[in-house]
C-alpha cells in the first residue's frame, strides 16, 4: 500500500510545532528530517525532550542526515512514538550494531542512499533492515529538482530486493509521482511539495491523486 509521508525539516521549535499540526492531520507517520551541519551543509532543530511532550497521534520516522547516527538514536530512546530510524549508508559506522540496537528498541531500521552511491553498498544489510530510502536529491535541503539517476537506483533496488519496503525522498511532486512509483517505490516523503504550498492539505491531496 502506498504512503505519502509529510517530511518536516524545521529550524526552530515553533516551525516544528506549526508543521506537525498540519502533518498529523494528513498521515499517521511523519518524517522528521534531522541535519547536523556536518554530513550535510544544512542543520535543523531537533530536541527529543521537547518533542515527546507534544501530544500528537502521529508516529515519527527519523531521517538522520548526520555523521553520528548513534548519538541521535541514543538521544531519541525515550520517545515512545518512533516508528523507525533511517540513517545513511555513506556514514562510516557499524551499521549492523545500529540495526540490532533498533531491534532492541522495538523500532524499525532503514538505510538511506544518496545519489551517486552504489546500490551494492546496502547489500550486506538488506536482510536485516525494514526499508531502503532512496534520495532523489542531494541530502540536506528541501525543494531541489529530482535527479533522474535516483529513479535508476530505485528500480535496481526494487528489482534486486522486491520484498524490502522502498521509500523515496526528494524531488517528490505531483508531476514526478508517477515516474517514482513506476520505479517500485511505495513510500513517498514530501516536504516542500506540501509545506511550500499556501494550502498544504490541498497539496497533499494532489500528491495522493497523482
Image (spheres, rainbow, N blue to C red):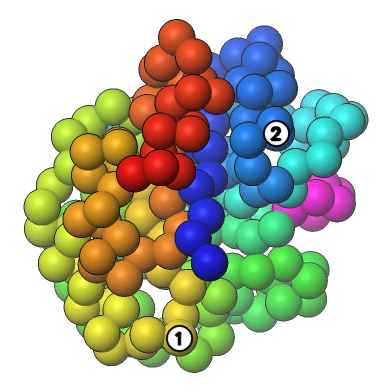
Assess whether residue 42 is covered by the magenta stretch.
no
Magenta region, residue range: 76-82
User: In x, y percent, where is residue 84?
Assistant: 64, 60
User: In x, y percent, where is residue 8?
Assistant: 54, 31
Mark 1 = which residue? 163
Q: Quadrant of residue 116?
A: bottom left
Q: Is residue 117 left or right of residue 45?
A: left
Assess whether residue 81 is covered by the magenta stretch.
yes
User: In x, y percent, where is residue 69?
Assistant: 54, 55
Residue 43 seen in the figure: no
Residue drawn at the location 70% of the way across and 33% of the way down? 24
Crowd tier of the residue under label 1, counting other residues whose Cα lies within 10 Å: few below 14, some 14–19, many 20 or above: few
Residue drawn at the location 30% of the way across and 79% of the way down? 158
Residue drawn at the location 31% of the way across and 70% of the way down? 184
**Quick one: quadrant of the C terminus?**
top left
Residue drawn at the location 10% of the way across and 58% of the way down? 149
- Between residue 135 and residue 36, name the one nearer to us: 135
Mark 2 = which residue? 24
Residue 21 seen in the figure: yes
Mark 1–mark 2 CB contact (< 8 Å): no
Amino acid at each position: 500500500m502506498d504512503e505519502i509521508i509529510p517530511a518536516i525539516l524545521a529550524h526552530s521549535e515553533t516551525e516544528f510545532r506549526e508543521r506537525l499540526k498540519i502533518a498529523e492531520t494528513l498521515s499517521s507517520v511523519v518524517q522528521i528530517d534531522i541535519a547536523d551541519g556536518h554530513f550535510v551543509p544544512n542543520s535543523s532543530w531537533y530536541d527529543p525532550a521537547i518533542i515527546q511532550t507534544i501530544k500528537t497521534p502521529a508516529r515519527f520516522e527519523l531521517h538522520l542526515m548526520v555523521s553520528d547516527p548513534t548519538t541521535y538514536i541514543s538521544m531519541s530512546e525515550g520517545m515512545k512514538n518512533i516508528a523507525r530510524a533511517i540513517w545513511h549508508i555513506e556514514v562510516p559506522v557499524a551499521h549492523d550494531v545500529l540495526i540490532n540496537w533498533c531491534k532492541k528498541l522495538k523500532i524499525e531500521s532503514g538505510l538511506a542512499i544518496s545519489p551517486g552511491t552504489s546500490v551494492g553498498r546496502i547489500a550486506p544489510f538488506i536482510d536485516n533492515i525494514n526499508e531502503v530510502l532512496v534520495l532523489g536529491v542531494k541530502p540536506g535541503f528541501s525543494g531541489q529538482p529530482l535527479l533522474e539517476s535516483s529513479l535508476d537506483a530505485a528500480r535496481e533496488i526494487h528489482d534486486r530486493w522486491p520484498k524490502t519496503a522502498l521509500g523515496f525522498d526528494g524531488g517528490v511532486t505531483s508531476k514526478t509521482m508517477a515516474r517514482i512509483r513506476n520505479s517500485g517505490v511505495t513510500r513517498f516523503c514530501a516536504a516542500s511539495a506540501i509545506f511550500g504550498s499556501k494550502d498544504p492539505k490541498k497539496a497533499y491531496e494532489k500528491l495522493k491523486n497523482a
